[in-house]
Amino acid sequence: MPTQVPWLIFLLPFFSFLFIGLVLRPFLSKYPRVGGYLTIGTVGISCALSLWVLGAVIAAPDHMLLVDDIQWAVVGNLNIHIGVLVDALTAVMVVVVTFVSLMVQIYSQGYMKGDPGYLRYYAFMSLFTACMLGLVLANNILFMFVFWEGVGLGSYLLIGFWFHKPSAANAAKKAFIVTRLGDFGFLAAILILYAQTGTFDTGTLYKLVAAGTLAGTTLTWVAIGIFSGAAGKSAQFPLHVWLPDAMEGPTPVSALIHAATMVAAGVFLVARFYPLFSHSTEAMTVVAVIGAFTAIFAASIGLVMNDIKRVLAYSTISQLGFMMLGLGVGSVAIGIFHLFTHAFLKALLFLGSGSVNHGTGTFDMRLMGGLRKAMPWTYITFVIGALSLAGIWPLAGFWSKDEILVSAFTNNPVLFGLAIITVFMTAFYMFRAIFMTFHGEYRGGAEPEHGTHGDSHSQGPHESPAVMVVPLVVLAVLAVCIGWINVTGFFSQLMGSGEAEAVSFVQGFFGVLTHPLPLISLIVALLGILLAYAMYCASVRKRDRKNDII
Amino acid sequence: MMDQIRYIAPEISLLCFALIVIVLDLFIKPKKVLPVIAVAGSFVALLAVLMLWGVPVTDVFNKMLAVDQFGLFFKALILVSLVLVILASNRYVLKFEKFQGEFYALLMLSAIGLMLLVSAINLITIYVALELSSISLYVLVSFLKDKQSSEAGLKYLILGAVASAILLYGMALIFGTTGNTCLTCIADYVKGMPAASLAGSPVLLIGLVLLISGFGFKIASVPFQMWVPDVYEGAPTPITAYLSVASKAAGFAVIARILLTAFGMPAWLHNDWAMIIAVLAVLTMTVGNIVALVQTNIKRLFGYSSIAQAGYLMVGLAAMGMAAQADSTIRSGLIFFLFSYTLTNLGAFIAIIAISNKINSDNIDDYSGMAKRSPLLATGLTICLVSLTGLPPTAGLIAKIYIFSGAVDQGLLWLVIIAVINSCISAFYYFKVVKVMWMGEPVNNDEVTSTWPEWLALGFCCLAVVVIGIIPGAFMAITQNAAKIFGI
Amino acid sequence: MNLNLLSWIIFLPVIGIVIIALLPKPGQKTVKWIALSATLASFLVSIAVFLMFNRSEAAIGQMQFEEKLLWIPAINSYYHLGVDGLSLPLVILMTFLGVISVLVSWKVELRPKQFFIWVLMLESSILGVFCSLDLILFFLFWELELIPMFFLISIWGSGRKEYAAYKYLIYTLVGSAFMLAGILSVYFITHTFDITALRGIQIGTSFIPLTVLFFLLMVGFAIKLPVFPLHTWLPDAHTNAPTAASVILAGALLKMGGYGMIRLCVSMLPQVALQYAPVMCTLAVIGVIYGAAVTLRQTDLKRLIAYSSVSHMGYVLLGIFALNQVSLTGASLQMFSHGVITGLLFAMVGLVYDKTHTRDLNNLSGLARQMPIIVVVFSIAGLASLGLPGTAGFVAEFITFAGSFTSVAVAGMKIFTLIAVIGIVVTSGYILWMLQRVFYGYPLDKYNGVKDADAVEMISTFAVVAVIMLVGIYPAILTNVIYMGIEPIAKLIGM
């Protein structure tokens, strides 16, 4: 295949956006389904291409594909090229983005059916996917910034998708401005890099850092600047405030943008410039501390939320903190591995919550309950996702979380302490959500948020259509097994840190339980689940029983 | 002697036509003929001036009058204003009923006086010519014979007489010191005086100061400007127009000639009087502009405006005085400004005459919505106001650039900065009129009509203003030619 | 072969004026079509010039399409036209906005004949400023622009239109008064009005300190740009002007200031510019932050955008006085991009106002439902204004920042730049807030009947969007040209 193929991964969704925006919406708005099919088709092809790229990268000796640059602008000594950088990190990210996006687009066929903004929705989704892919592919920090802002725009447009609701319009604005606050640091970092090195090219920057040309305080400030951008997008404390409000957007949007991909872009950014970070102890410390603090801080808020999406939102913030912690104390592989698993399982959870909403018309868990009978598929997949997120062996979340805990433990016991408490809280709030939503008795529900579903809710909660359930199932399968790829250290090796362990899959799979640390975390997580059961399931039953007696 | 008569052919021919007008006025009923004769006479005189243009510079009648391009240029300018004023008075003269003949004749006589004035090179001819023009103007100012006009005439007469007296004192003192009345002879005497004795000769200097003061009246420089608003307001509008241009142009011409010819040397002397002029220029333009801001009567407004414009002209005069070695830019700046100012101000007055004929008011508020009632008159007046403000594409801007460039060249940057700030202030009141005309609601919807002579005159002025504004080169060349006589 | 293309560009609108003026009682449509043809013809010629512009290395710093004719021999002044990389983009900008401003005025019914005469005259005079290579000619065109603008604001404006028109008039006149003094001083120091000869001229002796000369010229440009604290005319003029005038005012007219600074102040007196760069950069940063902060408090749509111009022009000033090649390029590009973006914003505000008859943010809400096309274009304009990548705004601001951040002209330039960068955060605040107030939220019943953009409005606004995107995605189309003009100027400073 020609070397410029990776471009297509980005260009296809972008074409879809242009076609919907310029052709379908003005001229063919009577056939909105075309927009959906077009988006699914282009993202599907992108996904296939991404898998091919991943294969090629794995096969390549240095896990890198070379793609030629295109000149963009020359201003004196400011010479800017456009190009794509395809290494293992990129390859993994494009797969995550295109795959989750594909699942979400398919799911949206059901979720958004009949919405008057159907075409607009798919246009924005395409735009977002294109920008996200552009961000991942760009080999130049300036273009990363370009697409960085592009995903911000996509997020803005999609959070404010139901713009007639003031809360949605407010949330969209808030998201954009808060992330832009972080971008100030990012832009400053770019300016410093340019002033110091005269280049924007990622590869060149790596070399300069390796050669020691770029070092010292400057490097620290650059790293902190980049991290401030990342903190904005990845909702790290204190720039996390926008993410919970961002749940005003349609739920598939939350799944794609505010759980799986865009918010992870910050983590990706830090990973992309990891060579810069790793040469500055201060910067690494900042990343680790902020990450750990965010993790526990957000998790503690998640404990008391009554809105299922907000629980998930705080959970996302907390998990992003975990990833940052993984990067700060460990390596690219550790942080990105968690990003990788988290993307699938959090998308699953969000889509599950969307399915619940579809069935009940509300996100308020106090109005739900007992849904496990009405929505069995949703229930099962949601539980799988929650178990995985809580870090129960041998689901995906366990493997990635375990590595973060290990590196935190070897690095700094305080951070490890924070992390292990977070694990406990995570298990607790996830199962609190499950017990409140799916167990007990049904408590009413409400009118749907956009009120345009063809079917009525008068008959009570009901399972979602197949087009929504199938993506849930696919994601649930991944939420179980996707973590296994690093059982033998394959993923770490691909990411360029660590050697493949000389163990067989089975040894690695079960052997992990022989170490004390995984066991501790497993026990802590189980305790969290138990506590949730005790507080929200058992007690309710008891009370009900009492009520029956009376 | 008699062969020199041809050098005053313009004045003589104009005089003949003035007499014809007076005589005819006695015999014929349709007064319409009179302006035709007056205009014809002016054209004959203009032709005579043009025929003299090429002759070598010379003086005639025992150094009483000079024949040079400077004088000829101003004679032509005065004649052109005369024609334009006569054309513009086309309807206005009906107010004078049976005195129309006198009106034209007196105008022509005063023009003769001014023409002699600009070519006079002897204190005596200067004084006589000045009185000839002034006495005609005293009469003309009070020609309406109503209360305001009579008051204006009386004021003009009294203050004019005082100014003449001052002037005469100055001349006497100068004569007393130098023993001469001819300008070149005075110059020779001054040059010959040892520096110390010249500096220690207060009589001569007092004479010079009195001379400047006397002409200050004519050119309406502060502090000799107080007659201007009342006279401008009271006088018949065509006479106001005439006063504001022809009389002022001649005044500047003669003061420039006296100062540069007689007192152009030595260096400290011309620097001294230039500084006096510069200071007076600051006062003149500032007072003129600031007081103009609050005027509600358009004639008074133009009175103050003409004071302010005199201030800019004095900037040019000061620059001429400062010039150590003569440079054509500096010397001709004043002349070019006078040229463009004359056309612009006349244009404005012609429009005002035409408008006030119809609406019988000089109140600026009554000009409201004039753009709707008479788009062309309003356009004409606007062009002239834009030129007076000094904005492109009009002669006013080029003239300002030209006159100020001379001043900057002589190191009078401070003066130029004050002048340009002043011209910003002037935008307020000029644009006030523009605003009223274009944005105000019309008082009523009567169309304001005008006659073809008014059109002709206004059209000529506006066209000239714009053409000079766009291609000023040729006109500047003429003024430079006129300024050559001051070469040292 | 010399086709005198620049003269055609400048005087095609004048031909339009003459035709409109000579028609005795032209119908409204006739006048509009004549105006459109005149501006369009001018635009097409300018595009031809753009395409024919020599971009080879040999032509760096050369004036192209020069025309030279002795004009006023007495003061050695020439009718001298020419464009280089600095002025060409601005010429294109003006001719383009000329077409747009005629289109956005398609519904003017009050005295259309006069209106279009003034619009065309405005266009001509601004084009003259950008093309003139003779100081006197430059000054003439500079002043000429005042008259049409005065009339446009005071007759077709709204609100306190007369006050605004006067304020505009006086501010500009004061500025140009000093400028005239400066220009005359330049002449008597160097004995030439030729702008090409003045670039990098070695001034030996001067009768006034060069600093004084620099500031005499600078005041006029600073008022026009505008530089804090000389900006107060701008909100009034913009707010009360009719849409077409606002478009041209914000789009092209302000750029005369920046252009003049680069063309005269920096090119002629680079050392003085260097000396006072800290002062100017301080003012620039104050302008950026102050402008943005004040914008946040506005409730009148037009005033809001007007103040945002103050903020955005601060970037231009910063770019100019960071005094290196990249920053100067950024400033030039920022002038172009701000021109199209803010031009579009004003056009959109005009549309909203036409349809709803209010500009008060407190009275607007939820218009997105009622005008789906306008909301898209308005949003694009807004996002471009806040510097979203992919639009011209981002490229220009980024290049400016990159240039000024690396500048060594001023100590502490990095701090200045970083403070200015904060401006873009505030910008996103007020732009999004504005969009939200106008378009999002509950639709109001009283606007149920309002129409969306019609064909003419769509053509004009889409054209601008296309330009914004084009420059945003492929900036080399302009930077390659700007380079031709900036390179020699940057060399003079030696940074």
Image (cartoon, rainbow, N blue to C red):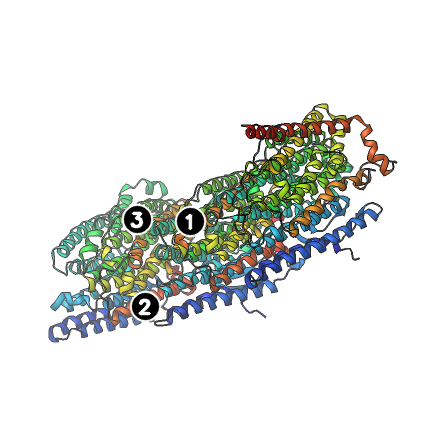
Give the Cα distance between marks 1 and 3: 46 Å
Asked if both marks, 1 and 2, belong to the same chain, the answer given is no
- Residue drawn at x 20%, y 62% is B359
Pick the quarter of the image with the N terminus of chain C. Answer: bottom right
Residues tagged 1 and 2 counted as in contact (Cβ below 8 A) = no
Other residues around mark 1 within 10 Å, as few (<14) / some (14–19) / many (≥20): many
Amino acid carrying label 1: it is Leu
Amino acid carrying label 2: it is Phe
Q: Nearer the viewer, residue B5 or B470?
A: B470
1 vs 3, front mark:
1
Q: Name the residue under label 3.
A: B289
Residue B34 x/y as whole percent: 18, 72
Q: Quadrant of residue B471?
A: bottom left
Other residues around mark 3 within 10 Å, as few (<14) / some (14–19) / many (≥20): many
Give the Cα distance between marks 1 and 2: 54 Å
Q: In which quarter of the image is residue B360?
A: bottom left
Give the Cα distance between marks 3 and 2: 27 Å
Chain name for mark 3: B
Chain name for mark 2: B
Asked if both marks, 3 and 2, belong to the same chain, the answer given is yes
Q: Indicate the secondary structure of the residue bearing disc 3.
A: helix
Q: Which of C95 and A355 is in front in this view?
A: A355
Amino acid carrying label 3: it is Asn
Seen in the picture, residue B292 relative to C108 is either above or below; the reply is: above
Q: Indicate the secondary structure of the residue bearing disc 1.
A: loop
Q: Name the residue under label 1.
A: C364
Q: Mark 2 points at which residue?
A: B460
Q: Nearer the viewer, residue B345 or C25?
A: C25
Query: Which badge, 3 or 2, comes first in the chain's sequence?
Result: 3
